[in-house]
Image: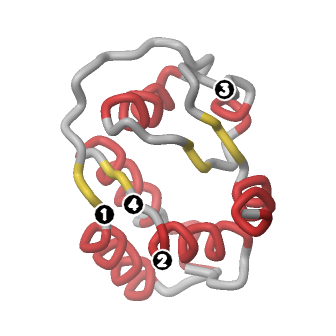
Amino acid sequence: MFEQSNSGLALNRTLESGILLLSMDVAEEYANVLRRDKFDHYVRRRIREEFLRTLIKEATFVEITETIQACRDSKDDKFLELAVSGGAPCLITGDEDLLILNPFREISILSPRQFLELFTKR
């Protein structure tokens, strides 16, 4: 939603030259988070809903083939399941509960800033 933030730049780079993976569970999580009233102060709901629609439209949906229980916050295991099931080379997140697992089964878990630094060097 904030195109010039590290997260926004990482998303745009992914859409330009990579593949954005989503699962139904992750898409539902994003939808629930973006509907929270606390974000009304920062971004209008309509803009958040449009962002989610665009994200879903641009993503490749992955069927989860493996249940994973590895994250200290079990609610975040769905992101590991997505990365493993989708054969992702990396998972981009700002969540410390996931970042601490880097690497996970040869999948790099990177912050948006780390991803941008690596992507720019190539």
Q: Are marks 2 and 3 in contact (CB under 8 Å)?
A: no
Quadrant, the C terminus: bottom right
Q: Which residue is mark 4?
A: 19
Task: State the residue lying farthest toward the front.
Answer: 122
Q: Which mark is residue 78?
A: none
Q: Examine the rendered structure and indicate whether residue 94 appears above or below residue 102.
A: below
Q: Which residue is mark 3?
A: 103
Q: Which mark is residue 16?
A: 2
Q: Is residue 23 left or right of residue 45?
A: left
Q: Earlier in the sequence, mark 4 or mark 3?
A: 4
Quadrant, the N terminus: bottom right
Q: Quadrant of residue 31?
A: bottom left
Q: Which residue is mark 1?
A: 59
Helix, strand or loop for disc 1: loop
Task: State the residue lying farthest toward the top.
Answer: 69
Dot 2: within a 10 Å radius of its alpha carbon, few (fewer than 14), some, or many (20 or more) residues? few
Residue beneath the point at 25% across and 73% down: 57
